[in-house]
Image: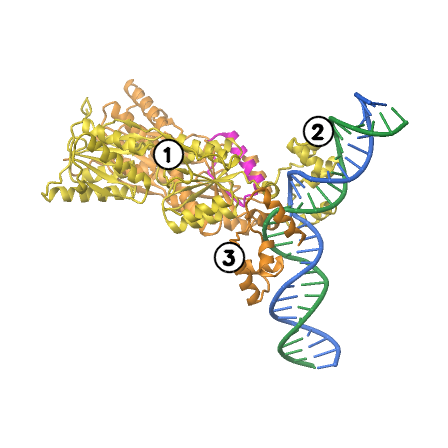
Chain colours: A orange, B yellow, C green, D blue
Amino acid sequence: MWNLFHTAVALGKWWIAISTIYKVAQKAGVSVATVSRALNDSGYVSREAKDRVLEAARELDYHMNVNARSLTCGKTYTIALVLPDIGNPFFPAVARGAEDYASDNGYCVILCNTDGNLRKESDYLKMLRSRKVDGVIFAVSVASRSSLNALADDGIAVVLVDRDLGDSYDIVKTDNIAGAMLATNHLIGLGHTRIAFISGPMPLATSRERLRGYCDALASKGIPFDERLVTEGDFRMESGHRAMQALLANSRSGDGVEFTAVFAANDMMAAGTMTALEEEGLRVPADVAVVGYDDINIASVMRPRLSTIAQPKYEMGWIAAETVTRRMSEPDGPRLEEVLQPVLVVRDSTVERRCASV
Amino acid sequence: MWNLFHTAVALGKWWIAISTIYKVAQKAGVSVATVSRALNDSGYVSREAKDRVLEAARELDYHMNVNARSLTCGKTYTIALVLPDIGNPFFPAVARGAEDYASDNGYCVILCNTDGNLRKESDYLKMLRSRKVDGVIFAVSVASRSSLNALADDGIAVVLVDRDLGDSYDIVKTDNIAGAMLATNHLIGLGHTRIAFISGPMPLATSRERLRGYCDALASKGIPFDERLVTEGDFRMESGHRAMQALLANSRSGDGVEFTAVFAANDMMAAGTMTALEEEGLRVPADVAVVGYDDINIASVMRPRLSTIAQPKYEMGWIAAETVTRRMSEPDGPRLEEVLQPVLVVRDSTVERRCASV
DNA sequence: TATCTGTGTGTAACCGCATACATACTACCA
DNA sequence: TGGTAGTATGTATGCGGTTACACACAGATA
């Protein structure tokens, strides 16, 4: 009651009357404990008392202060989404899935862009620790293991998405090796034997796995691996552009590094690649066939429309969010590893259209 | 001290030892007040005490509980970004700008997708109220005025971005009328007089402004406005596709509703439009010229590359975040209205390439 | 020497809520 | 009739911080 009195006074300083359970309790003529129980459907509350509380809360436009609840309950109903860059259309799709699951389940999502920068990654993780988020969905770039471990030590659920980091944490990903094999075999099936590969950054397991799939597919068909056909990019459009320029320069040097197809480790790099090919006057797919990876929503509006490996992005985000909540309720359960299957989507960048453009 | 004792016991239940200022105080041999002062550089603290506190904090790997601080200080250092859908590449760009500014200034960003759905919008706003976010950056779809007013009444700073709502709130936008005039005049300058317009949802001021710009440009050149050339979309690719199909059907009905150019109110609809045109065997720009709006990053990888009106998306987000923080510190200042200028970007969807494709 | 000012520190109250515990009443059973 | 179980409510404490206030002590001033 002393508290209520003080509250009324202190509010003067803001000129704003945010209602608390004390005010609701006062108005309903019950104690704060009863208000809390009534509002949360916990413990015993008489029908009559509950009605009075609900009515009072409505009249006062009462809204719970979630932060205060967090303090007593040790749960913030917040998860963080730590991504390299939502500018890459792959990640908004993942974010969408995660956000949908989260909001359906009473969580809210904090967005963090790391730019694949170690400093930013660990700064963010530190911040998330301070904010006591319940869980983190993380598309790692640099392996900020120690920061991650610190999170886990604090009891924060960690789920990796798309990019693995060994065997320590739960993960939701697609089978990158299978995906890359799908892409490569598709090209091989089309008769290509000189297939260039533009990889992602090699520090990422994801990139290495896709390279692995590429190699395995070649090997299984008895096609020799030529490392001069492999160039490293950074998943961004410009790097795909540069990579293709380099590949073409090499090819024209007359050292026998020609190629008739290219597999880019993501769609953005594939887009850059197609631009570079076009600039050099090469036709896709007639002169060079192109396959991407991700199937971002605009792959179908590129011209020629991009053949690619589709990842279930939305589902990845959704499942990641589901996984992180499961991990919260079961901190010591076995490691969860969800590996989804990618699918080949054939469009025009690998196969000449039946009816030539009118 | 009683508190410290209890803390030590309670922790057993988690098996996790998260350190608090009580523990730091104990280790450093000072009181919690001194710890707080030392950690926040506030009030008087002797050099020696401060060193001891810092050392103890380091050893215990102490990290402040931000939620607890929020409770006493009434500031959460959190802002929310309420968007229709990060799936539309326009919004990630805005989000990037907002997030960068926010994180540089110690804020974190909560992401909310409303799908332009009234229910979701008001649910989110209610949630954000409960979470006591310091500010909200909002790309409104439905006019959930009452929810917004409730936020403002709670002392939460509200800044609209891209989409205006009259005169109540701070806003960061571009000059849509000017932008639409730029686009339309560009087409007129190219000799087109029959220019179709695919608008955004008319409930949005943004859409109406762009329509207005289109009309004004026509009027200024003495070209009669033909409402049969105007179709309403919803800013998504599919709606652009459908709109163009409808426009073409109309055009072929022989009622004199032909057109030689189309201005789509955003790039996603322009992409759908180009697909529809292609499906009908029409060439862009030879048969129909197309202009979009936004200049999303993949506008340049469409083929033909899309001519469009560029909005400074990143800056809009950045400025919105800056504005929202300014509003926090100055709740009663004058309304802030930042109107940025859009720029015409001419690519291949309106002008035939000089060197024909090789 | 008495007073004052500037430092440094600790105690305890409070932020808004949840909840353990105590209490009180009713109804039921032995 | 006494005991017990179930229901309903209130009191008081803690969550992890911040901060008003009181107090102690230094050197400076009168």
The residue lying at 62 percent from left, 45 percent from top is A10
Residue where numbered disc 3 is placed: A58
B103 sits to left or right of A243: right
**Image quadrant in which the C terminus of chain A is located:** top left
Which kind of residue does numbered mark 1 sit on? Lys
* x 54%, y 35%: residue: A145
Magenta stretch, residue numbers? A116-140
Q: Position of residue B53 (x, y in %)?
A: 70, 33
The residue that appears at 58% across and 67% down in the rendered structure is A46
Asked whether, in this view, residue A62 is left or right of residue A211, the answer is right
> Residues at marks 2 and 3, common chain?
no
Question: Which residue, given by chain and number where applicable, does mark 2 sit on?
Answer: B51
Q: Residue A259: x percent and y percent?
A: 28, 27
Identify the disc placed on residue B173. 1
Residue A315 higher or lower than B355, as above or below:
below
* Mark 1: few/some/many CA within 10 Å (<14, 14-19, 20+): many
Displayed quadrant of residue B26: top right
Nearer to us of marks 2 and 3 is: 3
The residue type indicated by label 2 comes to: Asp
